[in-house]
Amino acid sequence: LEAKEEFRHKTLATDVMRPRRIDPPLSVLTQSGMTVEEVERLIADTTYSGFPVVISHQSERLVGFVLRRDLVISLENARRNQEGVVSMSPILFTECDPPMSSSAPPAVKLRSILDLSPFTVTVHTPMEIVVDIFRKLGLRQCLVIQNGRLLGIITKKDILKHMAQMANRDPDSILFN
Ligand code: ADP
């Protein structure tokens, strides 16, 4: 695709990111407060390659990004090898453990599989720049932030699909979009 210069400047990260308004909300993990069972259910109910980790659902501040395959392996390992791990065991991506009673099931600590610096852009970042960064850094996804809150995700496939859609449109109409 040789996108027209006008189109490239006009399309912003917000136009390509998911979820769209009609989509279910972004599937995120919180850095604490989730159980092994809850994370296993999220994995079973979705097919996403990864999940952003946020401080809390309320703050939506991004902590990092975890790949689905790393989560699956770590949870299987914990279930198999870590003593006392049960469905109600808490999952922790935090640096320090929150205080817990001695009778509580042991926590599964997963900070080591967290990418603490996932690539982020803002909703206003022109897609021309996003595409350039994807190419140069060989990214598979990047996260979209507005005012410090996590709003969405853009995968390589999302970009390719968007480009294909644009290529199928009447080029003149793109100019007036
Ligand atoms: P791909 O785009 O290569 O198929 P994924 O399977 O991870 O990669 O994503 C499928 C779709 O879901 C994409 O449109 C992507 O933007 C979106 N997506 C990816 N991760 C999440 C997530 N954690 N929550 C909601 N949507 C996501």
Image (tube, helix red, strand yellow):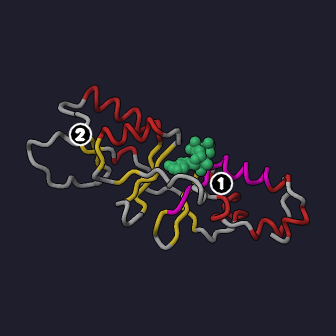
User: Can you see residue 98?
Assistant: yes
- Image coordinates for residue 32, horizontal then vertical, percent: 29, 53
Q: Amino acid at mark 1?
A: Phe
Q: Toward which corner of the image does residue 131 lie, by quadrant? A: bottom right
- The numbered mark at residue 69 is none
Which residue is drawn at the image coordinates 67% and 54% (left, top)? Answer: 136
| Observer able to see residue 140 | no
- The magenta stretch is 151-165
Where is mark 2, residue-wise? 88
State the SS at label 1: helix
Instruction: Identify the residue at horizontal 66%, vertical 61% (top origin).
Output: 130
- Work out which residue is located at the far bottom of the displayed protein and give it: 147
- The residue nearer to you, when weighing 173 against 163, is 173
Q: Is residue 41 magenta?
A: no
The answer to whether residue 49 is above or below residue 26 is above
Q: Position of residue 114 (x, y in %)?
A: 40, 48
Q: Which residue is under mark 1?
A: 134
Whether disc 1's CB lies below 8 Å from ligand 1 is answered no
- Label 2 SS: loop
